[in-house]
Image (cartoon, rainbow, N blue to C red):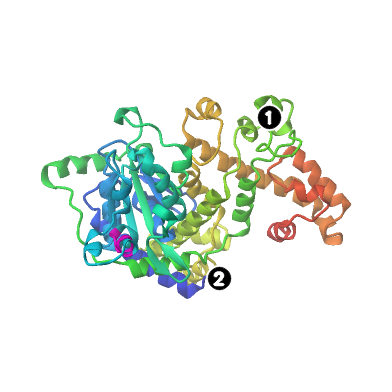
Amino acid sequence: MEKISYEEVLESIKKLDKLEKKFREASKNIYHSRKLVVYDKLYISYDLRDILLCGPLTNSNILFVGKSGTAKTHLALCLCSALFGKDYAFLPVNSNLSEEKLRDISFKTLKKGGNLSDAIKRTKLTEAPAVILDEVNMAPKEVLNILKNYLQNGLLVFEGGKEIKPGVKIENEIYQFKIGTCNEGPKYAVTQMEKAYRDRFAIEIRIDSFPMEAYDEMCLEDKIVTTSLNVPECESELETVLELYQIIKKIELDGVSKSLMRYLSRMSNCIKSKTKNKEDIEFSQELCKGCHPSREFYNICGNVFAPTNRTRINLKKMGQAFALLRAYKIAEKLKQGYLNKEVIRRYYKFSERKKLPKGIEKKFIKDYLSNLKVTFDDLKMAAPFVLVNKLDMNKAWVKKHFQGNEFIAIKFLINCIEEKIKRYYKECWLPIKEKMLSEPYGVETKKILKRYFEKDPWSIDIHSLEQSKEPDDFCEKFDIFS
């Protein structure tokens, strides 16, 4: 796919601005201004609405979890109304949901002489660009498998094996955004959603982890007396959403963010395993005794496993959305005159004493948008929303070190990987830099990499080394660090 151009980024920012403001207007009676993501060095932040927007912009399913009365369903309705007008479908999931109701056969079509295939195709669920699955964890067992397949592949399978992929066709694919709400826990007389089910949702937002600000509480008290929660009727912005969806896919990952993705893919590597992998042996903590990686970061190496390919793809998509949001926030701050000058200084590596040249802001924004890529920070900020409840993590380890909070554990994991990448560069790449220039991939280089694998098994594709092959990403990594 071709690289995103400056003109496309500029146009995308205008379109995103339109959608963002429309969603905020539609949901103005819901008060939740807490910052969920903060880019310290850029002085920008994302709130709940920003994170929710990433779902439809990347066609990523969202699971919205929290206690009753936190406006999950209303926010989902406002999001879909602002972006898709009246064209979205609303499916209340409860114990009375049957297979027939899920498939929602259009009996009007049958009465007019149409066949069953046409009757199924013309229902709102199959044609809608967005679907809200309200209280999705209440699905009866007989429809659970249908929902799993529907969430994963976008397919509804009917009697006789007939398959329909609901949604809106764009080029060679089908677009249909799905958002599920969930009241989870013993308070609500429902069981925890099984991992295989929630794994079908690319993004998970646990609203209880982000309590309202004091200001929001004050506004809410006034609203209870004066305002009712109504979902406004809006014009559809489907065309704009689809255009952004296609453009966001063009945003590339920079070198360090690629390193993060590789580290994540190798988290099941294990020095002590005969296969060099934790997944295909009977792994236990006993295996970690005396192992070098077990001595640091609370033995994170022995307590987490690599995410699936699907989860890593979802993280990349979320990182791409975060990158565009970042560009939008920076452009907005500059436009309003609130951009911190330190952002420009850092970008151009100006010293604190150097006076900023006249007109540098205009040059900065063009340079910044022209070189837009997914950065390590984009993936770092997005990771907890994508990886929570998707990673295999030792629950006892999470409970001991993070009070059972996976969201915090994942933040810790990404910080560890950041430190590992820095150390990898300093302790592995710098010593072999000269060797690489004279001998691109030789015996000495291989020895250094093998020794480093003993120290950090997540850093290297050990199977390529053992087969005396140059790792696929070897030259590319060298280009990054050199």
Q: Main secondary structure of the magenta part?
A: helix
Picture mark count: 2
**What is the span of residues highlighted in magenta in the rendered image?**
118-124
Q: Residues within 10 Å of mark 1 (few under 14, many from 20)?
A: few
The residue lying at 32 percent from left, 37 percent from top is 183
Which one is earlier in the sequence, the residue at label 1 or at label 2?
2
Which mark lies nearer to you, 1 or 2?
A: 2
Return the mark for residue 295. 1
Q: Evaluate whether residue 40 shows in this view.
A: yes
Of residues 342 and 109, the one nearer the viewer is 109
Q: Evaluate whether residue 22 shows in this view.
A: no
Looking at the image, is 192 positioned above or below residue 97? above
Q: Quadrant of the C terminus?
A: bottom right
> Left or right: where does residue 466 sit relative to residue 456?
right
Q: Amino acid at mark 2?
A: Lys
Q: Position of residue 437 (x, y in %)?
A: 83, 61
Return the mark for residue 172. none
The residue tagged with tag 1: helix, strand or loop? helix
The residue lying at 60 percent from left, 40 percent from top is 416
Q: Amino acid at mark 1?
A: Arg
Return the mark for residue 3. 2
Of residues 236 and 171, the one nearer the viewer is 171
> Which residue lies most toward the bottom here?
7
Is residue 123 shown in magenta?
yes
Q: CA distance from mark 1 to mark 2?
A: 42 Å
Q: Position of residue 9 (x, y in %)?
A: 46, 69
Q: Quadrant of the N terminus?
A: bottom right
> Left or right: where does residue 300 sit relative to residue 129?
right
The residue lying at 35 percent from left, 31 percent from top is 185
The residue tagged with tag 2: helix, strand or loop? loop
